Image (spheres, coloured by chain):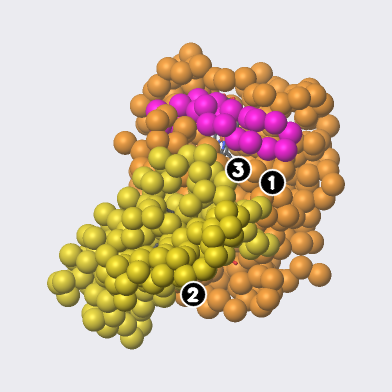
Chain colours: A yellow, B orange
């Protein structure tokens, strides 16, 4: 699905209905939400989405959880190869690509303001994310670069080099979690 | 230069009476040589006290607390350690004679680590985890001193703590120390092998894991019966999970290999990565141990009983 189709669909929706000011505002919010969701879909298909996946915090946090989990699954897959416990080099390449793509979504689309602990039920995102946004961006950039390097290294079959870079990527995950995530009890 | 040091990670809770790690013990410390094992490779003990000291230094995570993350000079102190009682600033422990500990004798250093006392006899706040370090062998403490003496001196004056009364009253500390500081070392336990004892030493004496992972009673004292069973208010007052062998609340479902791997790179069995200060422990400390030592920690943790 392309973004353009999404826009058309949204404007049809707006113009086909009533015109009372409040109603329009309400509908615009709904429409923007829908547009956001479509952007998210487009973003997932490869392109980087330039804005929050949605203006609906619930959708954002769902998408955030899904993205983070996909990175966790990828790391698990790569670790199976690194530890020589049944993983394959194809799994490493796939996993590295997943993480690299996901890393580019973190800053632009997964953490809009007011979507952390206290605002969203069950969120583990600390308020420091928004208080120290430049540091948070740096933490995400670190994952962008370490995972890009993992993609490069994974093109070889050098298990030792892959293991080393896997450790670097892991430190990028843990470094951000140390500062910006607080697990719920 | 320093690699990235994520923020805090202080065993705190501290004050009111201390982080007093109460130990039920009364016997000889483990062999002094043992702790230096590893850095010479293949289980051999290095001949060089500085190299042995570096290994203990890493195992005990001295760097993080005594260095301001990213911007600070190594070991020059000044890192803010937030606790419910106020903010403590770690001191300069470089060999600088004026602002560091360059003028200290070996006996001064041993006393600080073992008894929590400064050369002038005053007591330290237990935010400095000497209630764990007291179980370090004397040999390990001497090696630590040799390593610290070999580091570059940095001139940087200490910052006063910002702690309100009565918690900030150093003169009250000796009372708490008599109540809660047990300097008698970790007792030999019958029926346990050398690896288990090594793991326990790394967890309880050097790694001071319990400073974050054990619950505390109303006096801020580690609850020994519920050792490593998690804390509702660890660093910055945040919850820290249980790491006992409890299959639900603790890590009883993790294999020994999974625990050791987490200590090496921070990955949990489901592919998620630890945070909340634990990543720093991995980065500065457990990732720098030998695989053998990480395995010993994992083997020991598998035997820590669930809290009653």
Residue B302 x %, y %: 61, 73
Residue sitting at x 55%, y 65%: A18
> Would residue A182 be found to the left or right of residue B126 on screen?
left
Determine the chain carrying the residue at label 1.
B
The kind of secondary structure element at disc 2 is loop
Residue placed under numbered mark 2 in the picture: B270
Q: Are the residues flagged by discs 1 and 2 from a single subunit?
A: yes
2 or 3: tag closer to the N-terminus: 3
Q: Are the residues flagged by discs 1 and 3 from a single subunit?
A: yes
Relative depth, front residue between A90 and B115: A90
1 or 2: tag closer to the N-terminus: 1
Badge 2 density bin: few <14, some 14–19, many ≥20, Cα 10 Å = few
Distance from the alpha carbon under mark 1 to that under mark 3 = 10 Å
User: Compared to A78, does A103 lie above or below?
Assistant: above
Residue sitting at x 58%, y 57%: A20
């Amino acid at each position: 699905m392309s973004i353009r189709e999404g826009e058309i669909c949204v404007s049809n929706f707006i113009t086909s209905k009533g015109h009372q000011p409040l109603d329009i505002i309400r509908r615009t919010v709904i429409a923007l939400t829908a547009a956001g969701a479509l952007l998210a879909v487009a973003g997932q298909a490869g392109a980087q989405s330039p804005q929050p996946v949605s203006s609906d915090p619930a959708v954002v946090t769902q998408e955030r959880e899904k993205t983070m989990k996909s990175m966790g699954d990828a790391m698990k897959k790569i670790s199976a190869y690194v530890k020589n416990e049944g993983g394959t080099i194809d799994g490493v390449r796939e996993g590295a690509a997943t993480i690299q793509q996901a890393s580019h979504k973190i800053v632009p689309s997964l953490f809009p303001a007011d979507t952390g602990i206290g605002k969203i039920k069950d969120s583990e995102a600390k308020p420091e994310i928004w208080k120290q946004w430049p540091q948070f961006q740096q933490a995400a950039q670190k994952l962008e670069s370490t995972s890009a390097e993992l993609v490069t290294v994974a093109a070889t079959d050098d298990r030792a080099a892959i293991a080393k870079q896997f450790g670097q990527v892991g430190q990028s995950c843990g470094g951000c979690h140390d500062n910006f995530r607080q697990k719920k009890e | 230069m320093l690699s990235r040091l994520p923020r805090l990670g202080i065993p705190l809770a501290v004050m009111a009476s201390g982080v007093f790690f109460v130990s039920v013990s009364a016997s000889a410390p483990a062999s002094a040589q043992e702790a230096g094992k590893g850095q010479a490779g293949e289980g051999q003990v290095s001949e060089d006290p500085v190299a042995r000291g570096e290994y203990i230094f890493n195992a005990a995570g001295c760097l993080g607390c005594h260095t301001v993350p990213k911007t600070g000079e190594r070991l020059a102190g000044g890192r803010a350690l937030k606790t419910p009682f106020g903010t403590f600033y770690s001191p300069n422990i470089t060999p600088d004679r004026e602002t560091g500990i360059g003028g200290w004798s070996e006996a001064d250093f041993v006393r600080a680590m073992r008894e929590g006392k400064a050369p002038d006899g005053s007591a330290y706040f237990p935010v400095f985890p000497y209630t764990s370090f007291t179980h370090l062998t004397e040999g390990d403490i001497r090696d630590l001193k040799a390593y610290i003496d070999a580091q570059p001196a940095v001139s940087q004056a200490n910052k006063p703590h910002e702690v309100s009364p009565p918690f900030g009253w150093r003169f009250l500390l000796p009372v708490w120390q008599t109540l809660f500081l047990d300097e008698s070392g970790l007792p030999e336990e019958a029926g346990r092998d050398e690896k288990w004892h090594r793991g326990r030493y790394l967890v309880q004496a050097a790694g001071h894991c319990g400073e974050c992972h054990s619950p505390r009673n109303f006096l801020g004292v580690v609850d020994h019966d519920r050792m490593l069973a998690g804390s509702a208010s660890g660093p910055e007052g945040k919850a820290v999970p249980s790491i006992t062998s409890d299959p639900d609340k603790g890590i009883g479902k993790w294999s020994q290999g999974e625990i050791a791997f987490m200590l090496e790179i921070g990955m949990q069995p489901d592919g998620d990565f630890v945070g909340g200060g634990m990543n720093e422990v991995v980065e500065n400390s457990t990732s720098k141990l030998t695989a053998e030592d990480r395995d010993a920690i994992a083997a020991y943790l598998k035997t820590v009983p669930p809290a009653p």
